[in-house]
Image (tube, rainbow, N blue to C red):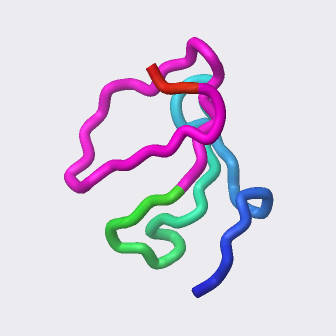
Amino acid sequence: MPILYRMGANTEEGYPGIPRTVLVDASHGAESLWVGHLDIAPGAQVMTHIHHDTEEAMVDRGRST
């Protein structure tokens, strides 16, 4: 299993004003897994959306409201 580093991954705009870095997705051979990092600034919002599988999130700085 490879070790993945965020600084070597592709970063793009996921939602308006929210950059996301993709670590694992279909382009890496994953069939039902997406792993990434979203840098959500204070006051920014991720729009309501639906996943057909489980979604988990971890806040590494700040807080979720």
| Residue 31 at x, y percent in the picture | 35, 73
Which residue is the extreme one toward the right? Answer: 7
Front residue of 13/7: it is 7
In this rendering, the answer to whether 31 lies above or below 25 is below
Q: Quadrant of residue 23?
A: bottom right
Q: Quadrant of the N terminus?
A: bottom right
Q: In which quarter of the image is the C terminus?
A: top left
Which residue is the extreme one toward the top? Answer: 43
> Left of 21 or right of it: where is 34?
left
Decide whether residue 48 is among the magenta residues: yes
In this rendering, the answer to whether 15 lies above or below 52 is above
In this rendering, the answer to whether 7 lies above or below 37 is below
| Residue 49 at x, y percent in the picture | 30, 33
| Residue 42 at x, y percent in the picture | 62, 17
| Residue 63 at x, y percent in the picture | 55, 26
Which residue does the image show at 64% across and 83% down from the upper left? 2
> Left of 3 or right of it: where is 34?
left
Which residue does the image show at 51% across and 70% down from the upper left? 27
Which residue is the extreme one toward the left? Answer: 52
Q: In which quarter of the image is residue 39?
A: top right
Decide whether residue 14 is among the magenta residues: no
Which residue does the image show at 65% across and 22% down from the upper left? 41
Query: Is the magenta region chiefly helix, strand or loop?
Result: loop
Residue stretch rendered in magenta on the structure: 36-62
Which residue does the image show at 48% across and 20% down from the upper left? 45
Q: In which quarter of the image is residue 43?
A: top right
How many numbered tags mark residues here? 0
